[in-house]
């Protein structure tokens, strides 16, 4: 526990928070601190000012507005995981949160913190991408909305700019008949996934449809549109699935834990399992 | 403080005569050979300030980058840069085996194969990292340190800092794990003590985990090149094995070369296998120095032997256990001398082997039933047998210390005892084991015995905690010292009872006259009070005091190899058989250890829970080596590719299955109370048992594992390769 020197403020309003953020180009938002604090202790991140938003009542909400599940930036992951409102309106959120770290981490970490951190291995960004979520961003000059698919640019790099605060995420609610599943594989319980997939799908009697997001496999969360089209075709073989996944993830991550070939094979198996969870056929 | 500021500090001695000298300095000056080598120290009033200063200092360093040597191939190639130019090569140890009869047997064997087996680099990874507090006051240096061998640390500090041993006190309070890594006396300890002396105030250093991963010793990192001769019946006629160990930069005290000698010395373990020729080469590379880690070479050797057995079984179409059975050591063969010279004193090799097969066979059926509905899961069982060298000579490891240890017993006036021993507590139950054994030897209650260890001012000189030796050498010295004080106590009691000392017995904490149940009794307290305080009550001519010191050193232990390199380097040998039952998911390649069995024999068991804990903890570390942990380096830059537990995959509770243990007890004929060791046993079996089980499960895919760790990626690649072939 040995970060470089930094200042710390705990503003009493979102307005004060964005003012504080604007005051220092090297300021960082802290909420749960589950990613930022380790980075600071390793001195991989050395912000000069921390703006703590974790106790802002105006950001502490989980509610449905206009057919969207809205989660404020103060909401801890564990709260969202256990929220009846979230479970009834967007089952994918709780399904994903079960995989995030360990319960102790989820007790502190926030939903929006994970989304804003932009780790390509984490679950929630893939959920956002798969569900076409919207990110509400405030800064000193105003508020804007960023679509999830425009939000993630590269590892740990998002569309957030200097002085921006992600205040809220809005996820379109489940429609009747929707089934959700998150599947991932990691070497150890609670680790970041080597590969993972979040699927929101319908089966029933009509045309199967699915929204598919992948994580852990590329430099940013992936919306797997080729795979979605294949699922809609309702008629797919292993080789067709392999092709679709290769199309969706043209440059899979390769690191000490897993090479790209293994990652894509794993992703294919996880897609099949997740589709089965959603009532689709294998 | 940089290298120039420690000019007045000594250089670590290179004691081992077969090793080329590394001349390790406390801080490195001209040449820095690995990431993690200490080159400068900053003292500040708090850690934040010190870290800031280190960052600033690092920015000012002028470093010319040299070409790193990162692999055995690079180290042994003709064009290799030399880590120590004066050597002429990169081999710190190079011992060539020469057994013509083995080569003749190989040439005569109907079939042969050669293979290279690889065991990856790991680190012992105690839960508590290293830490040092040093204070120099009134001409005495006191060092509190997380270490396995307080007296060896004291001797080394005194030597390097130019102090008398009597002026150095080393205290090792409850140490949060060592696993071999804290047997070494590290540069940081010397530097912190030196700083404390220069500054005249206490200095503290606590290693963080990122530092620990590069600055505390690594281990294993071996490859074994084997040439095996066998016949159609699956008899293995002979084997040549070249053990090549990458010991990193070699700048560690004591050197990390001995484990690779143990690998070749114990690899044939529980088997009657005379025709083995071993050569051993230790190369230096630009990695963190390798050192001691629980198992100390045995897991590597046993992995190779068992994989060779499984290969032969597959080649001749036999059950691997049918290849093992004719080789397994029989009771009638005891003592059995292994090809390397180790003399196995006793054991239950056949019984543990047969029992573990019963357990494994039943478990395999259970697990097969568990997964019968899932065509994507394959189930397998794997076995291994091995011996654990216990109470070894430390001379092969250190070139200086040998096998001695000591105890003192002081009977206090109230009838309790203070028992001080030279072994150390690093979380393996040594305090409670010592208390039990001493209470037993003194005829006292547990509560009446206080145990002292880990403080060089209070405990007699001893060698600490390593080598699965503590219980034996502690027992040897405690029992001897207890006999001395008991003899005197009987004389005092006899005087009070008006009987002959020979007729006095100690039962239920009281001295009585033999054959007079219910008669007059004298308590320990009465005897002790007379012996120490009311000396007026002593028989005429008997001096006061009730204490004794004793030492113990196994008499048959050899410290030097004979002309052919054979050495009986461990005084007694535990044995065990493991069975692993695994389920392999073909989709992810995930290996789930469904059941795990250890049938074990460590001679007389002192404390069942301690033995159980040692075995289960050892298995956990064995599983880590079999499936999870690895320390890869970038071959171009020499940078470690592990910075934290995100890369160094230590298995957690969720990954370690319940381990079922059973015990046989074959008392060690030459050891006190028949005790053997158990400290390293659990670690030795899992790499072999688990890889054997995985290969059983994936027999359809012709997987023949030659390398650990076995990962899901290994398995998927094998499945893919098999598909490509068909």
Image (tube, coloured by chain):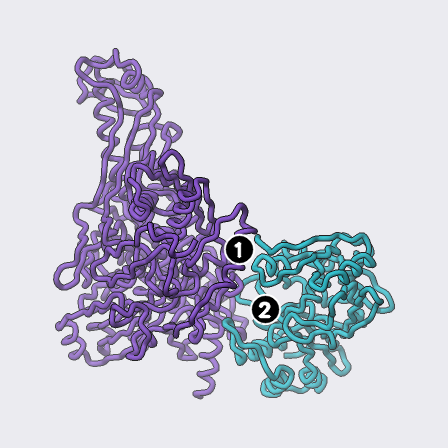
Left or right for B254, reference B50: left
- Among the chains pictured, the one given purple colouring is B
Q: Which residue is mark 1?
A: B53
Q: Position of residue A246 (x, y in %)?
A: 60, 84
- Quick check: A43 above or below A243? above
The answer to whether residue B365 is seen in the rendering is no
Q: Which residue is mark 2?
A: A193
Is A83 left or right of B444, judged from the image as shown?
right
Q: Residues within 10 Å of mark 2 (few under 14, many from 20)?
A: many
Disc 1: CA contacts within 10 A as few (<14), some (14-19) or many (>=20): some
Q: Position of residue B317 (x, y in %)?
A: 31, 77
Q: Pinpoint residue A256: horizontal percent, then vertical percent.
A: 50, 72
> Taking B487 as reference, is A234 left or right?
right
Q: Chain of mark 2?
A: A
Answer left or right for B585 relative to B119: right
Q: Is residue B681 visible?
A: yes
- For mark 1, give the secondary structure: helix
Q: Residue at x 47, y 79 (%)?
A: B717
Circle 2 sits in a helix, a strand or a loop, which is it?
loop
- Determine whether label 1 and label 2 are within 8 Å by CB: no
- 3D distance between C-alphas at marks 1 and 2: 37 Å
B559 is higher (above) or lower (below) than B419 = below
**Which hue belongs to chain A?**
cyan
Judging depth in this view, the residue of B452 and A162 nearest the camera is A162
Please report the residue visible at 54 percent of the width from the left and 49 percent of the height from the top: B47
């Amino acid at each position: 526990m040995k970060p470089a020197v930094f200042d710390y403020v705990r503003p009493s309003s979102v307005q004060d928070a964005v003012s504080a953020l604007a005051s220092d180009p090297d300021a960082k938002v802290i909420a749960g601190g589950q990613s930022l604090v380790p980075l600071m202790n390793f001195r991989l991140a050395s912000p000069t000012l921390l703006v703590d938003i974790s106790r802002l009542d105006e950001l502490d909400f989980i509610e449905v507005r206009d057919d969207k599940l809205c989660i404020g930036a103060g909401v801890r992951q564990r709260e969202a995981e256990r929220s009846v409102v979230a479970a009834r309106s967007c089952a994918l959120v709780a399904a994903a949160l079960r995989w995030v770290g360990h319960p102790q981490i989820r007790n502190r970490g926030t939903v929006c913190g994970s989304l804003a951190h932009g780790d390509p291995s984490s679950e929630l960004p893939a959920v956002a991408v798969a569900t076409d979520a919207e990110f509400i961003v405030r800064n000193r000059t105003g508020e804007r909305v960023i679509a999830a698919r425009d939000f993630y640019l590269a590892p740990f790099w998002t569309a957030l700019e200097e002085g921006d605060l992600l205040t809220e995420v809005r996820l379109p609610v489940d429609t009747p008949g929707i089934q959700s599943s998150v599947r991932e594989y990691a070497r150890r319980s609670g680790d970041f996934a080597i590969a993972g997939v979040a699927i929101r799908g319908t089966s029933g009697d009509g045309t199967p449809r699915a929204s598919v997001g992948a994580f852990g496999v590329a430099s940013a969360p992936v919306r797997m549109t080729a795979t979605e089209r294949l699922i809609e075709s309702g008629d797919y073989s292993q080789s067709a699935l392999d092709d679709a996944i290769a199309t969706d993830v043209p440059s899979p991550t390769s690191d000490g834990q897993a090479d790209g070939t293994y990652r894509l094979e794993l992703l294919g198996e996880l897609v099949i399992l997740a589709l089965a969870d959603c009532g689709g056929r294998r | 403080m940089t290298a120039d500021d420690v000019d007045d500090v000594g250089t670590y001695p290179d004691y081992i005569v077969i090793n080329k000298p590394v001349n390790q300095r406390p801080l490195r000056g001209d040449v820095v050979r690995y990431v993690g080598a200490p080159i400068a120290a900053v003292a500040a009033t708090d850690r934040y300030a010190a870290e800031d200063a280190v960052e600033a200092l690092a920015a000012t360093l002028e470093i010319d980058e040299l070409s790193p040597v990162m692999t055995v191939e690079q180290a042994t190639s003709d064009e290799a840069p030399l880590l120590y130019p004066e050597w002429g090569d990169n081999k710190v140890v190079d011992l060539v085996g020469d057994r013509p009869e083995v080569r003749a047997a190989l040439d005569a064997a109907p079939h042969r194969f050669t293979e290279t087996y690889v065991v990856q680099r790991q680190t012992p990874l105690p839960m508590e990292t290293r830490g040092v507090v040093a204070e120099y006051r009134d001409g005495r240096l006191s060092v509190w340190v997380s270490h396995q061998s307080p007296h060896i640390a004291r001797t080394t500090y005194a030597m390097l800092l130019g102090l008398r041993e009597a002026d150095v006190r080393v205290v090792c309070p409850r140490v949060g794990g060592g696993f071999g890594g804290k047997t070494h006396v590290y540069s940081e300890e010397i530097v912190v003590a030196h700083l404390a002396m220069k500054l005249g105030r206490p200095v503290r250093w606590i290693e963080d985990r990122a530092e620990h991963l590069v600055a505390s010793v690594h281990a294993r990192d071996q490859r074994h090149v084997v040439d095996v001769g066998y016949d159609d019946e699956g008899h293995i006629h002979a084997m040549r094995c070249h053990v090549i160990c990458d010991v990193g930069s070699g700048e560690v005290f004591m050197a990390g070369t001995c484990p690779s000698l143990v690998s070749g010395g114990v690899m044939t373990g529980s088997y009657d296998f005379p025709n083995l020729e071993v050569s051993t080469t230790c190369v230096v590379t630009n990695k963190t120095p390798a050192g001691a880690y629980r198992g100390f070479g045995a897991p590597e050797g046993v992995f190779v032997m068992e994989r060779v057995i499984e290969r032969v079984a597959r080649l001749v179409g036999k059950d691997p256990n049918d290849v093992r059975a004719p080789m397994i050591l029989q009771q009638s063969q005891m003592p059995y001398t292994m090809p390397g010279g180790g003399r196995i004193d006793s054991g239950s090799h056949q019984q543990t082997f047969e029992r573990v097969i019963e357990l494994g066979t039943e478990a395999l059926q259970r697990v097969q039933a568990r997964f019968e509905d899932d065509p994507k899961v394959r189930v397998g069982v794997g076995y291994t047998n091995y011996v654990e060298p216990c109470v070894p000579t430390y001379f092969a490891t250190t070139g200086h210390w040998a096998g001695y240890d000591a105890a003192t017993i002081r009977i206090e006036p109230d009838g309790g005892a203070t028992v001080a021993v030279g072994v150390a507590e690093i979380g393996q139950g040594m305090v409670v084991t010592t208390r039990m054994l001493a209470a037993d030897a003194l005829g006292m209650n547990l509560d009446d015995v206080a145990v002292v260890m880990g403080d060089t001012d209070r405990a007699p000189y001893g060698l600490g905690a390593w080598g699965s030796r503590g219980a034996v050498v502690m027992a040897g010295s405690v029992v001897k010292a207890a006999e001395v004080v008991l003899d005197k106590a009987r004389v005092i009691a006899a005087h009070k009872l008006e009987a002959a000392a020979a007729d006095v017995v100690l039962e239920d904490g009281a001295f009585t006259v033999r054959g007079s149940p219910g008669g007059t009794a004298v308590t320990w307290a009465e005897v002790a009070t007379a012996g120490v305080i009311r000396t007026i009550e002593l028989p005429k001519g008997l001096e006061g005091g009730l204490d004794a010191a004793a030492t113990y050193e196994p008499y048959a232990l050899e410290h030097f190899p004979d002309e052919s390199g054979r050495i009986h380097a461990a005084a007694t040998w535990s044995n065990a058989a493991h069975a692993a039952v695994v389920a392999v998911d073909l989709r992810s390649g995930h290996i789930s250890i469904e059941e795990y069995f250890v049938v074990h024999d460590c001679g007389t068991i002192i404390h069942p829970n301690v033995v159980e804990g040692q075995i289960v903890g050892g298995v956990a570390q064995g599983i880590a080596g079999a499936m999870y942990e690895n320390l890869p380096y970038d071959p171009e830059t020499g940078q470690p590719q592990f910075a934290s537990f995100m890369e160094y995959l230590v298995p957690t509770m969720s990954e370690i299955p319940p381990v079922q243990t059973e015990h046989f007890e074959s008392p060690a004929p030459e050891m006190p109370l028949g005790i053997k060791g158990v400290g390293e046993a659990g670690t030795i079996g899992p790499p072999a048992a688990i890889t054997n089980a995985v290969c059983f499960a994936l027999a359809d895919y012709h997987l023949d594992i030659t390398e650990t760790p076995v990962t899901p990626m290994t398995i998927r690649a094998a499945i893919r390769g098999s598909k490509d072939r068909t």
